[in-house]
Image (cartoon, helix red, strand yellow):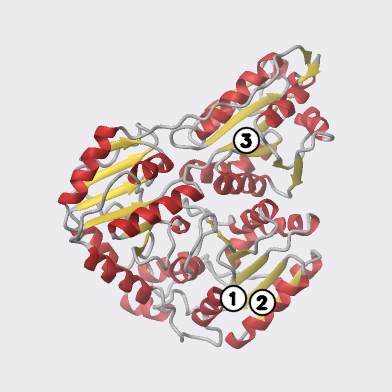
Amino acid sequence: MKTGGQLIVEALKANGVKRVSCVPGESYLAVLDALYESGIETLVCRQEGGAAMMADCWGRLTGEPGICMVTRGPGATNASAGLHIARQDSIPMILFIGQVQRDAREREAFQEVEYRRAFTEFAKWVGEIDDARRIPEFVTRAFAVATSGRPGPVVLTLPEDMLVDEVEAPAAQPYMPVEAHPGPSQMKQFDALLKEAQRPMFILGGTRWTEEAVAGFQEFASRFKVPVGCSFRRQMLFDHLHPSYAGDVGIGINPALAKEIKDSDLLVLVGARMSEMPSSSYTLIDIPYPAQKLVHVYPDPEELGRVYRPDLAICAAPAEFTAALAGLEPPAAPLWAERKSAMHDAYLKWSTPPKTGPGPVQMGPIMEWLDANTAEDAIFANGAGNYATWVHRFHRFRKFNTQAAPTSGSMGYGLPAAVAAKQLFPEREVICFAGDGCFMMHGQEFITAVRYNLPIITVLVNNGTYGTIRMHQEREYPGRVSATDLVNPDFVAFAKAYGGHGELVEKTEDFAAAFERARASGKPSIIEIKLDAEAITPTRTLTQIREKA
């Protein structure tokens, strides 16, 4: 006989779970008790949104569901921020929510929420376990749903009294992963389409990639000499210095790359959905019938043909499709090889940061220094804001699993993601990029890094404004600044008050030494960069945007 709480933890262990993030609540005390001697590491967070974002990051970097536990009502609704990221970003994650006792349901009991109604839009499946004997069944299903097809989050709610029931239940067994493979006839058709093309273009995106799949695709690109881009915030899927790399297909795309995509005669999407941001607000590819011949490779049949009608739809995960590519032979003299080289040269020019800009701090030289002085396996995490352009455009990602950023554009993600990444890969350097507005969304999780001795380095770009909104405001309502100015704390004092290391950078030349001191401190660190608000983008100032408007 075991309690529901014990059965939950046993099911997690059976499925290989090594860590969970949580904010504790009385609604799932029995689970917390079962975790006590389980061997599963529990990261206690300070807000449920941060805890859910940590679980998302674990899922993002491992391909296995990240696990988060929160209490009912306000705990669950706080966690919905991370749930939404996992849904839009196709990240496997399981959110366990303590629920009111069963005999109080439908009475609007204390902190009661009907999660099937509230969270169906946020999750692939929302279930409630009313009978503790069915815990192994529900948890195994949750892992299968979260990882199959298009991955995503699952929500399981746990009535408080169910968790203390003592029952007999079958021992939990691990879920069985299911993969879709391309058929021989599909690969033959793909091979013919590619060899008929004169201007092919490949775009990689989505999840379900592995280090082996990334290496395999790069080997294919080398053999076939095709140009390859990565969709928004999936840049770690291809080495940026590989001669086939053409650039990122996201917000603020290189106009030359956008033109090449539109002018291509064969477009191959591998793992990518090409939603609003990577498609430049659905302007790169015609809907529903693309001007180019389109091959769409995706692991979920419901996505194929949903927005874009492909000439060839292949229901397969990226790893399985890439393995099949190894059996294809390249043409003796690819027609597109010269175009590929020109596109890579255009990328190198586009990704070279500017040396100057308004104010005493220049982000261009700082990005150059970081690229020269961080390892190829360093992980960069960020949330959302104009500051992130400096990472996306100018940091040259070299290896798989070095980027943790939300394609959903959610602010506040960078810091909890950095905490999770460092916990997962303690031997690797983890750098969080954040704006002042973004950092304050989940800045309290800095204490989580301190508590668990996770020496992340946060590069905090402080321009005293919600920069992206201010940019749009100046474009649409020039000179009428409203609701976008910020008053910030002393971030150096903030870091020290939390038990970390703090640095202030007010001149470009001070950054390198500040970073080295942060690195040498062995503590979670914040490097506050005072950036002039005029430096709103790498190439345009607020004044220029206002005057053009």
- Quarter containing the N terminus: top right
Residue 33 in the image: above or below residue 269: above
User: Which image quadrant is residue 449 in?
Assistant: bottom right
- Residue pictured at 52% horizontal, 53% vertical: 410
Residue 133 in the image: above or below residue 447: above
Residue 507 visible (yes or no): yes
Which mark lies nearer to you, 3 or 2?
A: 2
| Image mark for residue 515 | 2
Q: Amino acid at mark 2?
A: Phe
Which mark lies nearer to you, 3 or 1?
A: 1
Residue closer to the observer: 468 or 211: 211
User: Which image quadrant is residue 432 in?
Assistant: bottom right
Identify the residue position indicated by label 3 in the image. Answer: 95
Identify the residue position indicated by label 1 in the image. Answer: 373
Q: CA gap, disc 3 to disc 1? A: 38 Å
Residue closer to the observer: 240 or 96: 240
**Where is residue 318 shown, x and y percent of the image?**
41, 43
Q: Residues within 10 Å of mark 3 (few under 14, many from 20)?
A: many
Q: Amino acid at mark 1?
A: Asn
Q: Find out whether the residues at labels 2 and 1 contact each other: C-beta distance under 8 Å.
A: yes
**Where is residue 69 shown, x and y percent of the image?**
69, 37
